[in-house]
Amino acid sequence: MSIHRTDLVPRPQFVRDARIFVIAVEGEKTEEQYFSLFENSRVHVEVLSAGSGSLSAPKHVLERLVRFEEQYDLGPEDERWFVADVDRQRGQFLDEVTQIARDSGYHLAISNPCFELWLLLHFREADPADTECRSVVESLRQHTGGHNKARINLKYYTPVTIREAIDRARTLDGGQENRWPSSPGTHVFKVAEKLLQLQLP
């Protein structure tokens, strides 16, 4: 038996409808915590994380999106997002999976080298040397006093810093339509911008 959107998202009576953003990610905790910032009465954010295991490869991210769409009654106003890192899967394999995702109507939000670069953009511009996730995480620790993937400090990620990160990421992108940045950058700003807009009254 299929589960309808009314079963998935309880809504107050004064809200006609809430949009659903389904966001499939590679990580176990970090992305889920971050995107929880955008939950409100106008939008329900459903993060499909890897959980505790090895299901973080892009093909598993795509599989989670497909299964969710098969199970739930999503409407045309709802959005499906494929969020992954270049750091883990480079080359032809990521190219094939993202092409399938795009052909399926899913939005792409790929980070090069990793999602943590998106978090770092809340504090500073990207550096051309930010090519490895290890160094990006180290820089993030310097700005936050520590970075725990299982428990990020959400106080640093406010509407003001999110807008700054969006502007920095858009500048890096340069308006190109590539599936992911060829140099340090992230397309997470595309989903963050939409979610931030839905927080406005």
Image (cartoon, helix red, strand yellow):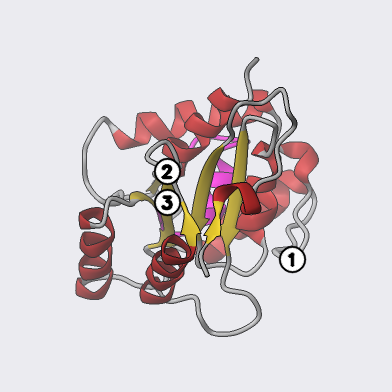
**Spot occupied by residue 149 in the image (x, y as percentages of width and height):** 69, 64
Name the mark on residue 150. Answer: 1
Quadrant for residue 94, please give it: bottom left
For label 3, the residue is 81
For label 2, the residue is 75
Q: Secondary structure at mark 1?
A: loop
Which amino acid is tagged 2? Gly
- Rounded to the nearest angstrom, the CA distance separating label 1 from label 2 is 32 Å
Earlier in the chain: of badge 1 and badge 3, it is: 3
Examine the rendered structure and indicate whether residue 159 appears above or below residue 25.
above
Earlier in the chain: of badge 3 and badge 2, it is: 2
Farthest residue to the front: give it: 1
Q: Nearer the viewer, mark 1 or mark 2?
A: 2
* Within-10-Å neighbours for mark 2: few <14, some 14–19, many 20+: few
Magenta residue check for 122? yes
Q: Which residues are magenta?
A: 110-125
Farthest residue to the bottom: give it: 54
Which amino acid is tagged 3? Trp
- Rounded to the nearest angstrom, the CA distance separating label 1 from label 3 is 22 Å
Say if mark 3 contacts mark 2, CB within 8 Å.
no
Asked whether residue 108 appears in the rendered view, the answer is: yes
**Spot occupied by residue 107 in the image (x, y as percentages of width and height):** 34, 47
